[in-house]
Amino acid sequence: EVQVVESGGGLVQPGGSLRLSCAVSGVSRFDFSNHYMDWVRQAPGRGLEWVGRTKNEANHYGSEYAASVEGRFTISRDASNYSLYLQMNSLKTEDTAIYYCARVGMSKAYYSFDYWGQGSLVTVS
Amino acid sequence: DIQMTQSPSSLSASVGDRVTITCRAGQSISTYLNWYQQKPGKPPKVLIYAASRLQSGVPSRFSGSASGTDFTLTISSLQPEDYATYYCQQSYRTPYTFGQGTKLEMK
C-alpha cells in the first residue's frame, strides 16, 4: 500500500523560510520515478489550492508552480530517498495552510490525485 | 486559469436520498474532471476521475457524468458515511483548479 507522509510544518514569521518534506513508501524506485508528485494546500476552513508539482523522470523531474508561489517556492525530489521537498521562502500570512503532498495517478491521459498525505500545517504569523 | 464553479455550496439531505452536485468549467476541459470527498481533519479522497470513471474501491452508489462544460456527481442512495465536503477539480491543464466545495450535511 502506498503511504505518503509529510513533515516539517510549523510556525514561521512573515518573510521567513520553511522546508516541508514528503516521504513516499510502499512503492518501487521505478514507480516513484514514474509518477508526478504535487503539493496542494488548504487554508483553514477554506478550499483546495494547487501549489505546484515535480514531473516524472521521463520529463526530467521538471517543476511547475501556481502563480501565487512562483519565485518563492521550490519543489524538488530525491528519488534515492523516495522523498519530495517543498522549500518555501519569503513566506506571507496568506501562505498559512495545511500542505498536502499528493501522488498524481495516471490512467491513460487522465490524471488525478490518488494518494495523499495527512498534511503538514504551516502557520505564518 | 480555468475557473471551476460548484453548486450548491451546501446541501442538506437524509440517508437514502439521491444527491446531485454540479460543477461547471469556465472553458472546455473535455472529460478531464475529478471528484473528491473530504471529511473533517482528513485529506481528500478521489471518487471519480475522467468525469465518469469510478476510482477503485469506491462504492458504486457514486457516479459522475458530463455534458459539455457541466459535470455532475450523483450519490444514488446517501449513506451515513457520505456526509462530507465534495470538490471537483480540472486536470485539463495546470494550474489545476478546484471548485469551492459542496458541504453535504444531515437533514
Image (cartoon, coloured by chain):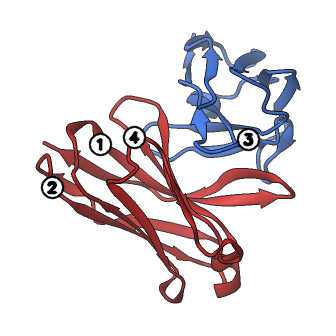
Chain colours: A red, B blue
Chain holding disc 3: B
Amino acid under disc 1? Asp
Q: x%, y% of residue A76? A: 45, 71
Q: Are marks 1 and 2 in contact (CB under 8 Å)?
A: no
Please tell me whether mark 2 sits on a helix, a strand or a loop.
loop
* Residue nearer the viewer, A43 or A74: A74
Q: Residue at x 36, y 29 (%)?
A: A45
Decide which of A106, A25 is in the foreground and name it: A106
Query: Which amino acid lies under the numbered mark 4 shown in the image of this protein?
Result: Ser
At label 2, which amino acid type do we have?
Gly
Q: Are marks 2 and 4 in contact (CB under 8 Å)?
A: no
Relative placement, left or right, of A28 versus A20 is right
The answer to which image quadrant residue A72 occupies is bottom left
In the picture, measured across the screen, residue B93 lies left or right of residue A91, that is: right
Estimate the spatial distance between the alpha carbons at disc 1 and disc 3, rounded to whole Å: 25 Å
Marks 1 and 4, how far apart at CA: 9 Å
Q: Are discs 1 and 2 located on one and the same chain?
A: yes
Labelled disc at residue A95: 1
Q: Are marks 1 and 4 in contact (CB under 8 Å)?
A: no
- Residue of label 4: A68
Q: Residue at x 70, y 75 (%)?
A: A34
Q: Position of residue B81 (x, y in %)?
A: 62, 34
Question: Looking at the image, which residue sits at the far bottom?
Answer: A80
Where residue B97 sits in the image (x, y, percent)?
A: 59, 35
Decide which of tag 1 and tag 4 comes sooner along the chain. 4
Q: Which mark is residue B92?
A: 3
The chain holding disc 2 is A
Query: In terms of secondary structure, where does tag 4 sit?
Result: loop
- Chain of residue at mark 4: A
Residue hosting label 2? A16
Tell whether label 3 touches label 4 (CB within 8 Å): no
The quadrant where residue A18 appears? bottom left
